[in-house]
Amino acid sequence: MKTFFSDEAVELDILKQRAFNLRWATVPEGTIALTAADPDFPCAPEIRNAIMDYTKSGYFSYGPPEGLPSFRKTVAEGLETRRGIQGSSKQVIPTNSAAYAMFLIAKYVLEPGDEVIIFDPVDFLFKKSVESAGGTPVYCPIEKSFATFNREELRSLVTPKTKMIAVCNPHNPLGHVLTRDELQFIADLAEEHDLYIMSDEIWSDIVFPPAEYISLASLSKEAAKRTFTVYGFSKTFGLAGLRLGFVHCPTEEIAEEVLELSEMRTTAYGVTTLSQIAGEAAWKHAWYYVDEFLEHLTEVRDIAYNWLNAIPGVDCRKPYGTYLMFPDISSFGKTSTEMADYLMKEAKVAVVPGAAKWFGPGAEGHIRICFSTSKKILMEGLDRIEQALVKL
Ligand SMILES: Cc1ncc(COP(=O)(O)O)c(C=O)c1O
């Protein structure tokens, strides 16, 4: 039976035409793409219907540069009820993707030469956004088997040039969901040194029990007033091509300044209205779909976790957030790039290498596997990976 997340739901013919960013449309025929992190499933019907309803009249007029009031309101209410983040809709700025929100925050916070503490490994967008604003990323290593950081080490990295700590929660690629205690430590450190925090929460809906999601800005009023919360609709709702995200700013005043800086009011003129309509429908009507998605993801996560760890030489941590596995493959004596090339050639499976350019220097010795696909495709991919690895 075809359900949202059954084997039959994945339409490979369409994905091969539309899924770029290292995925199906970019790999040779016959390759399984377990690469960039977005789902292989069509989005919730409520989102499609909202887009079709809006489209019917044929009007695509300019929207307000600061975002549709209904989108901002839906987000502000959702952040309050689902995340415990207080604030008004004026603190919400829709952006063209979560990635763009990160660039915008870096541009707002940093002067050339300022430092931002980011974790290592972490998604390359952290380094890129800081550098694009003329800032210097300073790596705080994460101990990969426990996926946590050393608190004294983090403290020691703060210098007079530090302006911000940037957090990825849940963590891409390690799948760690930060605990209240870890978040509080970061918030206290930021308070002590008067730093901003960028909390990238694009993965915050993809959390598996017993992990519990806590937004940094919900910890306290003090934490909220220095935290930029970033969110995007690519991971949870499968809307990567609509390039929709938002930033929730610490205050209305800061949101005004960020908006000014974004050129939305002058030239760029806001985010495409159709994307905001889709995002609004997602947050209003599609949480039931996310619940089903999580059920599916729990099943395939456990399959991938058990399978990978049963392959001699592979060591993989269980992720409690994200739909990413980050197995350690260093025992095979290949670099992560060599391993990704080998798997591509030998197994016809595309994975992301744990190369510095994707995740920072601390990622070496790992590959990243996205398991947000059907059980059938994932199992075929894992089988091929196993066959290729046992030959080494
Ligand atoms: C942690 C993190 N932040 C941001 C993004 C970018 O998301 P978007 O598609 O909204 O640009 C990703 C996508 O992989 C991500 O993993």
Image: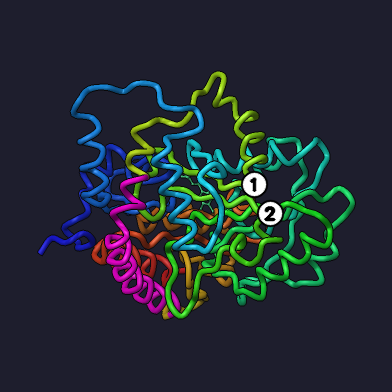
Q: Residue at (33%, 39%) from the top-left corner?
A: 277
Q: Is residue 344 in sight in this rendering?
A: no
- Judge left or right: residue 50 versus residue 200: left
Residue bearing mark 2: 225
Q: Does the magenta-highlighted stretch encompass residue 283?
A: yes
Question: What's the magenta bit mostly, secondary-structure-wise?
Answer: helix
Residue bearing mark 1: 251
Rendered location of residue 13, percent (x, y)? 20, 43
- Judge left or right: residue 385 versus residue 118: left
Q: Say which mark, if any, is on residue 171.
A: none
Distance Cα–Cα, label 2 vs label 1: 6 Å
The colour scheme is: rainbow
Which image quadrant is residue 62 in? top left
Q: Residue at (47%, 43%) from the top-left corner?
A: 245
What stretch of residues is rendered in magenta? Answer: 280-309
The secondary element bearing badge 1 is classed as: loop
Mark 1 residue type:
Thr
Q: Is residue 218 in sight in this rendering?
A: yes
Q: Residue at (25%, 33%) from the top-left corner?
A: 54
Mark before the other along the chain sequence, 2 or 1: 2
Q: Along the line of sight, which residue is nearer the eye, 6 or 334?
A: 6
